[in-house]
């Protein structure tokens, strides 16, 4: 089972996902994130995610494609060590921004950091 907690901070939506993502619920992850990415940049807080398989990664990439097409961004924050290893193995960091903390991910979107919003 997946649980989604959403918080809006300025022009950014932070979504904390808890549970496990596999082939059985990856489409639900994609659908829920797409609903939350309609007006803002998206930070996906992975601190509560216990498992993510490649179908979940594909869901994240689909959300990223949607965000890019609508002039928004999605970044990942707080991946566990096993998730970080998976992301390294598949070079996800070459395609998506991954931050070690939610605070760093939020700072990426702040106007005074010089980063594009």
Image (cartoon, grey):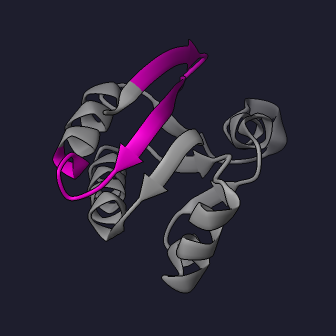
Residue in the picture at 61% in, 79% down: 88
Q: Is residue 65 left or right of residue 103?
A: left
As drawn, 45 above or below 23:
above
> Is 29 or 40 nearer to us in this picture?
29
Magenta span contains residue 66: no
Q: Is residue 52 left or right of residue 92?
A: left
Q: Position of residue 105 (x, y in %)?
A: 70, 42
Q: Position of residue 38 (x, y in %)?
A: 30, 28
Q: Quadrant of residue 71?
A: top left
Question: Magenta residues: mostly which secondary structure?
Answer: strand
> Is 10 or 28 nearer to us in this picture?
28
Q: Which stretch did the figure color magenta?
A: 4-27
* Residue 90 visible to an observer of this rendering: yes
Q: Position of residue 47 (x, y in %)?
A: 63, 40
Residue in the picture at 31% in, 33% down: 1
Magenta span contains residue 19: yes
């Amino acid at each position: 089972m997946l649980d989604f907690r959403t918080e809006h901070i300025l022009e950014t939506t932070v979504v904390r996902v808890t549970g496990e993502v596999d082939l059985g619920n990856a489409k639900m992850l994609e659908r829920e994130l797409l609903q939350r990415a309609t007006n803002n940049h998206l930070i996906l807080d992975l601190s509560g995610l216990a498992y993510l398989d490649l179908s979940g990664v594909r869901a994240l990439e689909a959300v990223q494609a949607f965000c890019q097409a609508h002039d928004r961004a999605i970044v990942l924050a707080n991946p566990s060590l096993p998730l970080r290893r998976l992301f390294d193995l598949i070079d996800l960091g070459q395609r998506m921004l991954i931050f070690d903390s939610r605070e760093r991910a939020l700072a990426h979107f702040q106007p005074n950091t010089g980063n594009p919003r």
